[in-house]
Amino acid sequence: MYIKKNLEEARQKIIRLRKALFQAKNIQMFKQNAEMLRLVRRIYMLTKKEPKRFYRAERFFYQTLDSVVELTEKYAFLSSHPKKNKELSMSLSEARITLAELTKRLEEDLTQLMGDEIGELQFELDAAKHSLKK
């Protein structure tokens, strides 16, 4: 029940994120946003398929996803203003940098979520290399 509730909350946040992401006005932000959405959806789908993975992705569900959604919504809102002063431009620039850092954090969260599979693959690769040497 606990995991189901958290997955439903995450689904709602992903819907909000998708709406905010595609309000981007420049192509560079659009590409970054599409990558962010791809990572978020991948983590969500892996956790939904295998709920036991939820505990390996807690940072994603409790920190990273919230930060990404809030920052993206605020960025979309502020970037839609027609008149941009120096302060707003600086804030938007800082937000883009922070979103890039959050994208890296999403990649880390996905890697942590898939830790067992990466370890198993490495074991299989080592075994295959060893058998090739013989």
Image (cartoon, grey):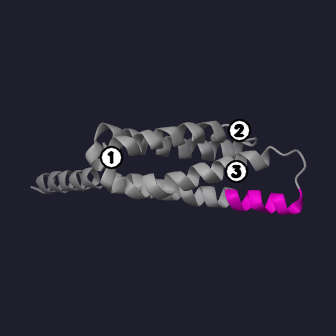
Q: Residue at x 46, y 43 (%)?
A: 10
Give whichever of discs 2 and 3 has the lower sequence position: 2
User: As shown in the figure, which amino acid type bears the numbered disc 2?
Assistant: Gln
**Label 3: which secondary element:** helix
**Label 1: which secondary element:** helix
Give the image location of residue 129, x and y in percent.
18, 55
Q: Nearer the viewer, residue 73 or 94?
A: 73
In the rendered view of the protein, which quadrant contains the C terminus?
A: bottom left
Can residue 46 be seen here? The reply is: no
Give the image location of residue 91, x and y in percent.
76, 61
Q: Residues within 10 Å of mark 2 (few under 14, many from 20)?
A: some
Residue 30 relative to residue 101: left or right: right
Q: Which residue is mark 3?
A: 74
User: As shown in the figure, which amino acid type bears the numbered disc 1?
Assistant: Tyr
Distance in Å between CA atoms under marks 1 and 3: 29 Å
Q: Mark number for residue 23?
A: 2
Is 97 contained in the magenta span? no
Q: Which residue is mark 1?
A: 2
Q: Residue at x 61, y 52 (%)?
A: 70
**Label 2: which secondary element:** loop
Residue 80: which quarter of the image? Answer: top right
Residue 77 relative to residue 5: left or right: right
Give the image location of residue 35, x and y in percent.
55, 44
* Residue range highlighted in magenta: 85-95
Can residue 60 be seen here? The reply is: yes
Residue 81 relative to residue 24: left or right: right
Q: Nearer the viewer, mark 2 or mark 3?
A: 3
